[in-house]
Amino acid sequence: MQTEYITIKEASQLISLELKRKVTTSNIAYLINYGRITKHGENGDTVINKKELLDYYNSYYGDRALNWKTKLGEGIDWHLSFENYKETETTKHVHRLHPYKGKFIPQLVEYFLDDHLDEFKSEKYFNNGDIILDPFCGSGTTLVQANELGIHGIGIDISAFNALISNVKVASYELTDIQNEIHKINLALSNFVLNSNCLKFEKVLLDELSIFNQKYFPSPEYKRKTRLGEINENQYGVKRANEFLVIYNRLIAEYKIELLNENNNGFLNKWYLKHVRKEIDFVFDMIKKINNPSTKKIVTIILSRTIRSCRATTHSDLATLLEPVRTTYYCSKHGKICKPLFSILSWWARYSKDTLKRISEFNSLRSNTYQHCFKGDSRTLDLQNSVKKVNPEFSTKLEKQKIKGIFSSPPYVGLINYHEQHEYAYDLFGFERNDQFEIGPLFKGQGKTAKEAYVDGISEVLNNCKRFLNNDYHVFLVANDKYNLYPIIAERVGMTIVKQFKRPVLNRTEKDKGAYSESIFHLRNK
Protein backbone atom coordinates (compact mmCIF):
# COMPACT_ATOMS: atom_id res chain seq x y z
CA MET A 1 0.00 0.00 0.00
CA GLN A 2 1.40 3.37 -0.98
CA THR A 3 2.05 5.72 1.94
CA GLU A 4 0.14 8.98 1.62
CA TYR A 5 1.84 12.19 2.74
CA ILE A 6 0.06 15.50 3.28
CA THR A 7 1.16 19.07 4.01
CA ILE A 8 0.67 20.79 7.38
CA LYS A 9 -2.19 22.85 5.91
CA GLU A 10 -3.90 19.72 4.56
CA ALA A 11 -3.43 18.03 7.95
CA SER A 12 -5.07 21.00 9.67
CA GLN A 13 -8.08 20.82 7.35
CA LEU A 14 -8.39 17.03 7.66
CA ILE A 15 -8.32 16.90 11.48
CA SER A 16 -10.65 19.91 11.75
CA LEU A 17 -13.22 17.94 9.76
CA GLU A 18 -12.61 14.76 11.78
CA LEU A 19 -13.00 16.45 15.17
CA LYS A 20 -15.58 19.04 14.06
CA ARG A 21 -13.48 21.77 15.69
CA LYS A 22 -10.77 24.12 14.50
CA VAL A 23 -7.31 22.55 14.50
CA THR A 24 -4.75 25.08 13.27
CA THR A 25 -1.52 24.62 11.36
CA SER A 26 0.22 25.71 14.59
CA ASN A 27 -1.38 22.75 16.39
CA ILE A 28 0.03 20.37 13.76
CA ALA A 29 3.45 22.08 13.86
CA TYR A 30 3.51 21.62 17.64
CA LEU A 31 3.04 17.85 17.22
CA ILE A 32 5.94 17.76 14.76
CA ASN A 33 8.25 19.91 16.90
CA TYR A 34 7.59 17.81 19.99
CA GLY A 35 8.08 14.51 18.21
CA ARG A 36 4.47 13.31 18.45
CA ILE A 37 4.38 12.71 14.70
CA THR A 38 7.31 12.31 12.30
CA LYS A 39 8.47 15.07 9.99
CA HIS A 40 9.09 14.10 6.33
CA GLY A 41 10.07 16.04 3.24
CA GLU A 42 13.14 17.89 2.01
CA ASN A 43 14.21 21.41 1.09
CA GLY A 44 11.86 23.01 3.60
CA ASP A 45 8.73 21.31 2.24
CA THR A 46 7.43 19.55 5.34
CA VAL A 47 4.94 16.71 4.88
CA ILE A 48 3.59 14.12 7.32
CA ASN A 49 2.23 10.62 7.11
CA LYS A 50 -1.57 10.83 6.92
CA LYS A 51 -2.11 7.48 8.65
CA GLU A 52 0.26 8.37 11.51
CA LEU A 53 -1.60 11.67 11.99
CA LEU A 54 -5.04 10.01 12.07
CA ASP A 55 -3.78 7.27 14.40
CA TYR A 56 -2.48 9.90 16.82
CA TYR A 57 -5.74 11.86 16.98
CA ASN A 58 -7.93 8.75 17.06
CA SER A 59 -5.96 7.29 19.95
CA TYR A 60 -5.85 10.59 21.84
CA TYR A 61 -9.52 11.53 21.50
CA GLY A 62 -11.29 8.26 20.83
CA ASP A 63 -9.41 5.94 23.17
CA ARG A 64 -9.27 8.56 25.89
CA ALA A 65 -13.05 8.79 26.17
CA LEU A 66 -13.36 4.98 26.25
CA ASN A 67 -10.49 4.51 28.74
CA TRP A 68 -11.69 7.25 31.05
CA LYS A 69 -15.23 5.91 31.11
CA THR A 70 -13.84 2.49 32.02
CA LYS A 71 -11.70 3.89 34.84
CA LEU A 72 -14.19 6.44 36.17
CA GLY A 73 -17.40 4.46 35.73
CA GLU A 74 -20.33 4.53 33.36
CA GLY A 75 -21.96 7.42 35.22
CA ILE A 76 -19.51 9.84 33.63
CA ASP A 77 -21.15 12.83 31.86
CA TRP A 78 -18.78 13.17 28.91
CA HIS A 79 -20.73 16.13 27.49
CA LEU A 80 -19.44 18.13 30.48
CA SER A 81 -15.82 17.52 29.48
CA PHE A 82 -16.11 20.40 26.96
CA GLU A 83 -13.37 18.69 24.95
CA ASN A 84 -14.46 20.47 21.78
CA TYR A 85 -13.32 23.81 23.21
CA LYS A 86 -9.83 25.12 22.49
CA GLU A 87 -7.70 26.56 25.28
CA THR A 88 -8.27 30.07 23.94
CA GLU A 89 -12.00 29.54 24.58
CA THR A 90 -11.65 28.04 28.05
CA THR A 91 -9.40 30.97 29.01
CA LYS A 92 -11.37 33.65 27.15
CA HIS A 93 -11.10 37.40 27.82
CA VAL A 94 -10.55 38.32 31.51
CA HIS A 95 -10.53 34.71 32.72
CA ARG A 96 -6.79 34.61 32.05
CA LEU A 97 -5.82 37.93 33.59
CA HIS A 98 -3.95 35.97 36.24
CA PRO A 99 -3.10 32.27 36.85
CA TYR A 100 -5.03 30.47 39.58
CA LYS A 101 -4.80 26.82 40.61
CA GLY A 102 -7.97 24.79 40.88
CA LYS A 103 -10.40 27.07 39.02
CA PHE A 104 -13.16 25.67 36.85
CA ILE A 105 -13.53 26.65 33.21
CA PRO A 106 -16.14 29.31 32.30
CA GLN A 107 -18.07 26.89 30.07
CA LEU A 108 -18.99 24.83 33.14
CA VAL A 109 -20.49 27.86 34.89
CA GLU A 110 -22.17 28.94 31.68
CA TYR A 111 -23.78 25.51 31.22
CA PHE A 112 -25.71 25.74 34.50
CA LEU A 113 -26.37 29.49 34.53
CA ASP A 114 -27.63 30.07 30.99
CA ASP A 115 -31.14 29.35 29.70
CA HIS A 116 -30.42 26.48 27.28
CA LEU A 117 -31.97 23.03 27.74
CA ASP A 118 -30.67 19.68 26.46
CA GLU A 119 -31.04 15.96 27.13
CA PHE A 120 -29.00 16.32 30.34
CA LYS A 121 -30.26 19.72 31.56
CA SER A 122 -34.03 19.51 31.58
CA GLU A 123 -34.85 22.75 33.41
CA LYS A 124 -33.68 26.35 33.50
CA TYR A 125 -32.23 27.26 36.88
CA PHE A 126 -31.54 30.99 36.55
CA ASN A 127 -32.94 34.01 34.70
CA ASN A 128 -31.68 37.45 33.72
CA GLY A 129 -31.67 39.74 36.74
CA ASP A 130 -31.29 36.92 39.28
CA ILE A 131 -28.61 37.15 41.97
CA ILE A 132 -26.08 34.35 42.33
CA LEU A 133 -23.53 33.79 45.08
CA ASP A 134 -20.08 32.18 45.10
CA PRO A 135 -18.92 31.82 48.73
CA PHE A 136 -15.54 30.41 47.58
CA CYS A 137 -14.98 33.01 44.90
CA GLY A 138 -11.36 32.18 44.08
CA SER A 139 -10.41 34.03 40.90
CA GLY A 140 -13.95 35.16 40.10
CA THR A 141 -15.00 32.81 37.29
CA THR A 142 -18.61 32.68 38.49
CA LEU A 143 -18.85 36.48 38.77
CA VAL A 144 -17.47 37.03 35.27
CA GLN A 145 -19.82 34.52 33.65
CA ALA A 146 -22.80 35.83 35.61
CA ASN A 147 -22.04 39.30 34.28
CA GLU A 148 -21.79 37.99 30.72
CA LEU A 149 -25.22 36.34 31.11
CA GLY A 150 -26.97 39.33 32.69
CA ILE A 151 -27.05 37.87 36.20
CA HIS A 152 -25.91 39.74 39.33
CA GLY A 153 -23.01 38.08 41.13
CA ILE A 154 -21.69 38.28 44.69
CA GLY A 155 -18.54 36.54 45.84
CA ILE A 156 -16.82 35.93 49.16
CA ASP A 157 -13.23 34.81 49.68
CA ILE A 158 -10.99 34.58 52.74
CA SER A 159 -7.95 35.55 50.64
CA ALA A 160 -7.34 39.27 50.09
CA PHE A 161 -5.47 38.54 46.87
CA ASN A 162 -8.28 36.33 45.52
CA ALA A 163 -10.78 39.13 46.21
CA LEU A 164 -8.51 41.55 44.35
CA ILE A 165 -8.25 39.27 41.28
CA SER A 166 -12.02 38.75 41.19
CA ASN A 167 -12.86 42.44 41.50
CA VAL A 168 -10.27 43.46 38.93
CA LYS A 169 -11.83 41.07 36.41
CA VAL A 170 -15.35 42.49 36.71
CA ALA A 171 -14.41 46.18 37.08
CA SER A 172 -14.91 48.86 34.43
CA TYR A 173 -11.87 50.83 33.24
CA GLU A 174 -10.66 53.91 31.43
CA LEU A 175 -8.54 52.08 28.86
CA THR A 176 -6.70 55.23 27.80
CA ASP A 177 -5.57 55.85 31.36
CA ILE A 178 -4.29 52.27 31.69
CA GLN A 179 -2.44 52.58 28.36
CA ASN A 180 -0.79 55.81 29.48
CA GLU A 181 0.38 54.38 32.80
CA ILE A 182 1.69 51.21 31.18
CA HIS A 183 3.55 53.30 28.60
CA LYS A 184 5.26 55.32 31.36
CA ILE A 185 6.34 52.15 33.14
CA ASN A 186 7.54 50.53 29.89
CA LEU A 187 9.82 53.48 29.11
CA ALA A 188 11.17 53.75 32.64
CA LEU A 189 11.77 49.99 32.97
CA SER A 190 13.49 49.82 29.57
CA ASN A 191 15.89 52.58 30.63
CA PHE A 192 16.46 50.90 33.99
CA VAL A 193 17.40 47.63 32.26
CA LEU A 194 19.59 49.42 29.69
CA ASN A 195 21.68 50.90 32.48
CA SER A 196 22.57 47.45 33.77
CA ASN A 197 24.90 44.76 32.45
CA CYS A 198 22.09 42.22 32.38
CA LEU A 199 20.85 43.08 28.89
CA LYS A 200 24.26 42.58 27.29
CA PHE A 201 24.89 39.45 29.32
CA GLU A 202 21.56 37.86 28.42
CA LYS A 203 22.01 38.58 24.70
CA VAL A 204 25.38 36.81 24.65
CA LEU A 205 23.99 33.97 26.78
CA LEU A 206 21.08 33.44 24.37
CA ASP A 207 23.44 33.34 21.41
CA GLU A 208 25.58 30.70 23.14
CA LEU A 209 22.49 28.68 24.08
CA SER A 210 21.20 28.77 20.51
CA ILE A 211 24.47 27.36 19.13
CA PHE A 212 24.70 24.71 21.85
CA ASN A 213 21.07 23.58 21.58
CA GLN A 214 21.15 23.37 17.79
CA LYS A 215 24.20 21.14 18.05
CA TYR A 216 23.10 18.78 20.85
CA PHE A 217 19.28 19.07 20.88
CA PRO A 218 18.19 19.47 17.22
CA SER A 219 14.42 19.79 16.87
CA PRO A 220 12.38 17.73 16.24
CA GLU A 221 14.86 14.86 15.91
CA TYR A 222 15.97 14.95 19.54
CA LYS A 223 12.43 14.89 20.96
CA ARG A 224 11.43 12.05 18.64
CA LYS A 225 14.46 9.97 19.69
CA THR A 226 13.76 10.50 23.41
CA ARG A 227 10.11 9.57 22.91
CA LEU A 228 11.14 6.36 21.14
CA GLY A 229 13.69 5.55 23.84
CA GLU A 230 16.69 5.88 21.53
CA ILE A 231 18.21 8.48 23.91
CA ASN A 232 18.26 8.25 27.71
CA GLU A 233 16.94 11.75 28.35
CA ASN A 234 18.01 12.03 31.98
CA GLN A 235 21.61 10.95 31.45
CA TYR A 236 22.07 12.86 28.20
CA GLY A 237 20.40 16.03 29.54
CA VAL A 238 22.50 16.12 32.72
CA LYS A 239 25.71 15.53 30.78
CA ARG A 240 25.08 18.37 28.33
CA ALA A 241 23.83 20.71 31.06
CA ASN A 242 27.13 20.24 32.95
CA GLU A 243 29.04 21.00 29.76
CA PHE A 244 27.17 24.26 29.22
CA LEU A 245 27.66 25.32 32.85
CA VAL A 246 31.30 26.05 32.02
CA ILE A 247 30.18 28.61 29.42
CA TYR A 248 27.53 30.04 31.78
CA ASN A 249 29.91 30.53 34.69
CA ARG A 250 32.45 32.23 32.42
CA LEU A 251 29.82 34.73 31.22
CA ILE A 252 28.59 35.39 34.78
CA ALA A 253 32.14 36.30 35.80
CA GLU A 254 32.84 38.31 32.64
CA TYR A 255 29.73 40.50 32.97
CA LYS A 256 29.90 40.65 36.79
CA ILE A 257 26.32 39.39 37.21
CA GLU A 258 25.14 39.12 40.83
CA LEU A 259 22.67 36.28 41.35
CA LEU A 260 21.94 36.31 45.09
CA ASN A 261 20.10 38.96 47.09
CA GLU A 262 21.72 40.38 50.21
CA ASN A 263 19.55 38.15 52.40
CA ASN A 264 17.30 35.16 51.89
CA ASN A 265 14.39 36.42 54.02
CA GLY A 266 10.98 36.31 52.42
CA PHE A 267 9.70 34.76 49.20
CA LEU A 268 10.96 37.48 46.86
CA ASN A 269 14.56 37.37 48.07
CA LYS A 270 14.64 33.59 47.82
CA TRP A 271 12.90 32.98 44.50
CA TYR A 272 14.13 35.87 42.33
CA LEU A 273 17.58 36.69 40.99
CA LYS A 274 19.02 39.92 42.32
CA HIS A 275 18.42 42.10 39.26
CA VAL A 276 14.92 40.71 38.76
CA ARG A 277 14.17 41.63 42.38
CA LYS A 278 15.37 45.19 41.72
CA GLU A 279 13.17 45.48 38.63
CA ILE A 280 10.12 44.27 40.58
CA ASP A 281 10.65 46.94 43.25
CA PHE A 282 11.25 49.57 40.55
CA VAL A 283 7.91 48.84 38.81
CA PHE A 284 6.00 48.55 42.09
CA ASP A 285 7.28 51.95 43.20
CA MET A 286 5.90 53.43 39.97
CA ILE A 287 2.54 51.70 40.45
CA LYS A 288 2.20 53.26 43.92
CA LYS A 289 2.21 56.69 42.24
CA ILE A 290 -0.79 55.95 39.96
CA ASN A 291 -3.70 58.21 40.96
CA ASN A 292 -6.67 56.35 39.42
CA PRO A 293 -7.58 53.54 41.91
CA SER A 294 -9.02 51.16 39.29
CA THR A 295 -6.00 51.67 37.01
CA LYS A 296 -3.67 51.06 39.94
CA LYS A 297 -5.41 47.74 40.72
CA ILE A 298 -5.32 46.36 37.17
CA VAL A 299 -1.66 47.36 36.73
CA THR A 300 -0.91 45.69 40.08
CA ILE A 301 -2.38 42.46 38.71
CA ILE A 302 -0.22 42.78 35.57
CA LEU A 303 2.86 43.03 37.81
CA SER A 304 1.72 40.04 39.87
CA ARG A 305 1.17 37.94 36.75
CA THR A 306 4.58 39.03 35.48
CA ILE A 307 6.54 38.14 38.60
CA ARG A 308 4.84 34.76 38.82
CA SER A 309 6.39 33.91 35.44
CA CYS A 310 9.82 35.23 36.47
CA ARG A 311 10.53 33.05 39.51
CA ALA A 312 13.95 31.39 39.56
CA THR A 313 12.73 27.89 38.84
CA THR A 314 12.61 25.41 35.97
CA HIS A 315 9.85 25.62 33.38
CA SER A 316 8.42 22.29 34.51
CA ASP A 317 8.26 23.32 38.19
CA LEU A 318 6.35 26.61 37.84
CA ALA A 319 3.19 25.08 39.35
CA THR A 320 4.99 23.42 42.28
CA LEU A 321 8.20 25.13 43.35
CA LEU A 322 11.05 22.87 44.47
CA GLU A 323 14.36 24.73 44.81
CA PRO A 324 15.55 28.06 43.36
CA VAL A 325 17.43 27.64 40.06
CA ARG A 326 20.14 30.22 39.38
CA THR A 327 22.03 28.47 36.58
CA THR A 328 21.27 27.05 33.16
CA TYR A 329 19.72 23.57 33.29
CA TYR A 330 18.36 20.76 31.15
CA CYS A 331 14.65 21.42 30.62
CA SER A 332 12.56 18.28 30.18
CA LYS A 333 9.59 20.38 29.10
CA HIS A 334 11.37 21.94 26.11
CA GLY A 335 13.98 19.25 25.49
CA LYS A 336 17.01 21.54 25.57
CA ILE A 337 19.18 23.68 27.87
CA CYS A 338 17.19 26.58 29.32
CA LYS A 339 18.07 29.49 31.60
CA PRO A 340 16.53 31.37 34.52
CA LEU A 341 15.11 34.84 33.89
CA PHE A 342 17.37 37.86 34.41
CA SER A 343 14.76 40.54 33.64
CA ILE A 344 10.99 40.98 33.85
CA LEU A 345 10.90 43.36 30.87
CA SER A 346 9.68 40.97 28.15
CA TRP A 347 7.03 39.35 30.35
CA TRP A 348 5.83 42.73 31.61
CA ALA A 349 5.42 43.97 28.02
CA ARG A 350 3.66 40.77 26.93
CA TYR A 351 1.20 40.71 29.82
CA SER A 352 0.49 44.45 29.60
CA LYS A 353 -0.54 44.08 25.97
CA ASP A 354 -2.51 40.90 26.68
CA THR A 355 -4.38 42.49 29.60
CA LEU A 356 -5.54 45.47 27.53
CA LYS A 357 -6.77 43.11 24.83
CA ARG A 358 -8.68 40.94 27.31
CA ILE A 359 -10.35 43.88 29.04
CA SER A 360 -11.48 45.22 25.66
CA GLU A 361 -12.93 41.81 24.73
CA PHE A 362 -14.89 41.58 27.96
CA ASN A 363 -16.16 45.16 27.59
CA SER A 364 -17.97 44.12 24.40
CA LEU A 365 -19.75 41.29 26.27
CA ARG A 366 -20.43 42.66 29.73
CA SER A 367 -23.91 43.46 31.02
CA ASN A 368 -25.02 46.26 33.33
CA THR A 369 -25.23 44.05 36.40
CA TYR A 370 -23.72 44.17 39.89
CA GLN A 371 -20.66 42.08 40.71
CA HIS A 372 -18.41 42.25 43.75
CA CYS A 373 -16.25 39.89 45.78
CA PHE A 374 -16.08 40.57 49.51
CA LYS A 375 -12.96 39.69 51.42
CA GLY A 376 -14.14 37.72 54.46
CA ASP A 377 -15.05 34.39 56.02
CA SER A 378 -18.08 32.81 54.33
CA ARG A 379 -18.93 31.04 57.58
CA THR A 380 -19.70 34.29 59.40
CA LEU A 381 -19.87 37.21 56.95
CA ASP A 382 -23.14 39.19 57.06
CA LEU A 383 -23.74 39.55 53.35
CA GLN A 384 -26.63 42.01 53.61
CA ASN A 385 -24.64 44.50 55.71
CA SER A 386 -21.50 44.01 53.62
CA VAL A 387 -23.36 44.89 50.41
CA LYS A 388 -25.04 47.85 52.12
CA LYS A 389 -21.66 49.40 52.96
CA VAL A 390 -20.45 49.43 49.35
CA ASN A 391 -23.73 49.71 47.40
CA PRO A 392 -26.86 50.72 49.37
CA GLU A 393 -29.03 50.64 46.23
CA PHE A 394 -28.15 47.02 45.41
CA SER A 395 -28.51 46.15 49.10
CA THR A 396 -32.21 47.09 48.85
CA LYS A 397 -32.58 44.82 45.81
CA LEU A 398 -30.81 41.98 47.64
CA GLU A 399 -33.05 42.32 50.69
CA LYS A 400 -36.21 42.28 48.58
CA GLN A 401 -35.26 39.75 45.89
CA LYS A 402 -32.79 37.56 47.79
CA ILE A 403 -30.24 35.26 46.17
CA LYS A 404 -31.51 32.74 43.64
CA GLY A 405 -28.67 30.28 44.10
CA ILE A 406 -25.04 29.35 44.54
CA PHE A 407 -22.48 28.19 42.01
CA SER A 408 -19.15 27.48 43.62
CA SER A 409 -16.18 25.14 43.84
CA PRO A 410 -15.33 24.69 47.52
CA PRO A 411 -11.73 23.76 48.38
CA TYR A 412 -10.97 20.03 48.34
CA VAL A 413 -9.72 18.19 51.41
CA GLY A 414 -5.95 18.55 51.84
CA LEU A 415 -5.19 19.52 48.24
CA ILE A 416 -4.02 23.16 48.04
CA ASN A 417 -2.73 25.84 50.41
CA TYR A 418 -4.57 28.69 48.73
CA HIS A 419 -2.50 31.51 50.21
CA GLU A 420 0.79 29.84 49.32
CA GLN A 421 0.10 29.70 45.59
CA HIS A 422 0.30 33.53 45.49
CA GLU A 423 2.95 33.92 48.17
CA TYR A 424 4.99 36.26 45.96
CA ALA A 425 2.05 38.70 45.84
CA TYR A 426 1.50 38.62 49.60
CA ASP A 427 5.19 39.32 50.12
CA LEU A 428 5.34 42.24 47.67
CA PHE A 429 1.96 43.89 48.27
CA GLY A 430 1.84 43.31 52.03
CA PHE A 431 -1.63 41.72 52.13
CA GLU A 432 -2.75 40.19 55.42
CA ARG A 433 -2.68 36.39 55.26
CA ASN A 434 -5.51 34.27 56.61
CA ASP A 435 -4.12 30.75 56.16
CA GLN A 436 -5.57 29.68 59.50
CA PHE A 437 -9.11 30.32 58.21
CA GLU A 438 -8.79 28.20 55.05
CA ILE A 439 -11.16 25.21 54.84
CA GLY A 440 -9.48 21.92 53.92
CA PRO A 441 -5.95 23.25 53.26
CA LEU A 442 -3.06 21.00 52.32
CA PHE A 443 -1.21 21.71 55.57
CA LYS A 444 -4.04 20.09 57.58
CA GLY A 445 -3.76 16.83 55.63
CA GLN A 446 -6.50 14.33 54.73
CA GLY A 447 -6.87 12.41 57.98
CA LYS A 448 -10.02 11.84 60.02
CA THR A 449 -9.70 15.11 61.94
CA ALA A 450 -9.13 17.07 58.70
CA LYS A 451 -12.23 15.51 57.09
CA GLU A 452 -14.39 16.27 60.13
CA ALA A 453 -13.14 19.86 60.16
CA TYR A 454 -13.89 20.10 56.44
CA VAL A 455 -17.48 18.91 56.89
CA ASP A 456 -17.92 21.40 59.72
CA GLY A 457 -16.46 24.24 57.65
CA ILE A 458 -18.50 23.68 54.46
CA SER A 459 -21.66 23.15 56.54
CA GLU A 460 -21.09 26.44 58.39
CA VAL A 461 -20.66 28.25 55.07
CA LEU A 462 -23.89 26.86 53.61
CA ASN A 463 -25.86 27.52 56.79
CA ASN A 464 -24.64 31.12 56.85
CA CYS A 465 -25.42 31.64 53.14
CA LYS A 466 -28.89 30.05 53.41
CA ARG A 467 -30.06 33.12 55.32
CA PHE A 468 -29.79 35.16 52.13
CA LEU A 469 -31.29 32.63 49.65
CA ASN A 470 -34.88 32.70 48.50
CA ASN A 471 -36.99 29.59 49.13
CA ASP A 472 -36.81 28.32 45.55
CA TYR A 473 -33.00 28.24 45.43
CA HIS A 474 -30.58 26.11 43.40
CA VAL A 475 -27.15 25.30 44.82
CA PHE A 476 -24.42 23.85 42.58
CA LEU A 477 -21.17 22.73 44.23
CA VAL A 478 -18.25 21.42 42.17
CA ALA A 479 -16.17 18.92 44.14
CA ASN A 480 -14.05 15.81 43.80
CA ASP A 481 -15.82 14.06 46.66
CA LYS A 482 -13.65 10.95 46.95
CA TYR A 483 -14.42 10.70 50.68
CA ASN A 484 -18.22 10.90 50.14
CA LEU A 485 -18.60 13.88 52.46
CA TYR A 486 -21.22 15.89 50.56
CA PRO A 487 -24.21 13.67 51.45
CA ILE A 488 -23.26 14.28 55.10
CA ILE A 489 -22.92 18.03 54.48
CA ALA A 490 -26.26 18.20 52.66
CA GLU A 491 -28.03 16.42 55.52
CA ARG A 492 -26.41 18.69 58.09
CA VAL A 493 -27.57 21.91 56.36
CA GLY A 494 -31.09 20.73 55.58
CA MET A 495 -30.59 20.37 51.83
CA THR A 496 -31.29 17.52 49.43
CA ILE A 497 -28.95 16.41 46.63
CA VAL A 498 -31.46 16.22 43.76
CA LYS A 499 -28.86 15.35 41.13
CA GLN A 500 -25.15 14.60 40.83
CA PHE A 501 -23.35 15.26 37.55
CA LYS A 502 -20.00 13.48 37.13
CA ARG A 503 -17.63 15.43 34.92
CA PRO A 504 -14.27 14.29 33.44
CA VAL A 505 -11.59 16.96 33.86
CA LEU A 506 -9.43 16.87 30.74
CA ASN A 507 -7.20 19.95 30.83
CA ARG A 508 -5.52 19.95 34.20
CA THR A 509 -2.51 22.19 34.88
CA GLU A 510 -0.86 19.68 37.21
CA LYS A 511 1.63 17.12 35.91
CA ASP A 512 -0.76 14.23 36.58
CA LYS A 513 -2.74 13.79 33.36
CA GLY A 514 -4.47 10.56 34.39
CA ALA A 515 -8.22 9.92 34.46
CA TYR A 516 -9.80 12.38 36.87
CA SER A 517 -13.35 13.50 37.53
CA GLU A 518 -15.27 15.91 39.69
CA SER A 519 -18.93 16.00 40.68
CA ILE A 520 -21.38 18.85 40.40
CA PHE A 521 -23.86 18.44 43.23
CA HIS A 522 -27.25 20.05 42.68
CA LEU A 523 -28.81 20.79 46.06
CA ARG A 524 -32.23 22.18 46.88
CA ASN A 525 -34.33 23.03 49.90
CA LYS A 526 -35.35 19.92 51.82
Image (cartoon, rainbow, N blue to C red):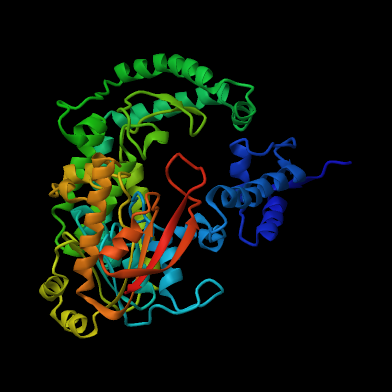
User: Is residue 56 visible from the viewing direction of this image?
Assistant: yes
- For residue 452, side relative to residue 81 (left or right): left
> Would you place residue 471 above or below residue 424 in this image?
below
x, y percent for residue 49: 75, 42
- For residue 248, side relative to residue 121 (left or right): left
x, y percent for residue 39: 69, 37
Query: Quarter-wise, where is residue 322 in the image?
Result: top left
The residue positioned 28% from the left and 66% from the top of the image is 176
x, y percent for residue 421: 28, 44
User: Is residue 156 visible from the viewing direction of this image?
Assistant: no
Residue closer to the observer: 211 or 220: 220
Query: Quarter-wise, where is residue 281 in the image?
Result: top left
x, y percent for residue 258: 24, 24
- Residue lying farthest bottom? 400
> Would you place residue 286 above or below residue 522 in this image?
above
Residue closer to the observer: 475 or 373: 475
> Would you place residue 301 above or below residue 244 in this image?
below
The residue positioned 54% from the left and 75% from the top of the image is 118
Query: Quarter-wise, where is residue 307 in the image?
Result: top left
Looking at the rendering, in which quadrant would you find the C terminus?
bottom left
Residue closer to the observer: 161 or 361: 161
